[in-house]
Amino acid sequence: MLKVTIDRRRCIGAGNCIYVAPTVFRWREGDLLKPELLDPSTVEDDVLREAAASCPTNAIEIDEVDETG
């Protein structure tokens, strides 16, 4: 399973992540040009990694998480 984290201080609001994975990211209400995380399980892992790679400031981090706890 993948864990997604957005570093809002590094984010410049380019919106590339939203374009690549609109079911995972959307514009955050009340926070001009900052994305929020919705549901990473709605896309394949490679699409999630592509969305993170599309960020020009590397504000999206993806980590592998052991599902067994």
Image (spheres, rainbow, N blue to C red):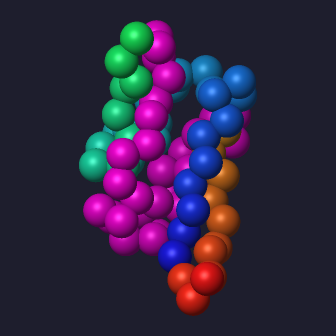
Q: Say whether residue 51 is magenta.
A: yes
Query: Is 9 situated left or right of 35 in this image?
Result: right
Number of disc labels: 0
Q: Can residue 21 be seen in this view?
A: no
Rendered position, 16 above or below 23: above
Query: Is 5 situated left or right of 58 in this image?
Result: left
20 or 26: nearer the eye?
26
Q: Which residue is drawn at the image coordinates 35% and 34% (left, top)?
A: 26
Q: Which residue is drawn at the image coordinates 46% and 11% (left, top)?
A: 32
In what quadrant of the picture does the C terminus appear? bottom right
Residue 64 horizontal/vertical position (percent): 64, 73
63 or 54: nearer the eye?
63
What residue span does the magenta drawing correspond to? 31-58
Residue 29 horizontal/vertical position (percent): 36, 18
Query: Is 35 situated left or right of 10 in this image?
Result: left
Residue 31 horizontal/vertical position (percent): 47, 14
Q: Which residue is drawn at the image coordinates 66% and 52% (left, top)?
A: 61
Q: Say whether residue 16 is magenta.
A: no
Residue 25 horizontal/vertical position (percent): 39, 41
Q: Which residue is drawn at the image coordinates 45% and 34% (left, top)?
A: 36
22 or 4: nearer the eye?
4
The quarter of the picture where residue 56 lies is: top right
Q: Is residue 45 visible?
A: yes
The quarter of the picture where residue 63 lies is: bottom right
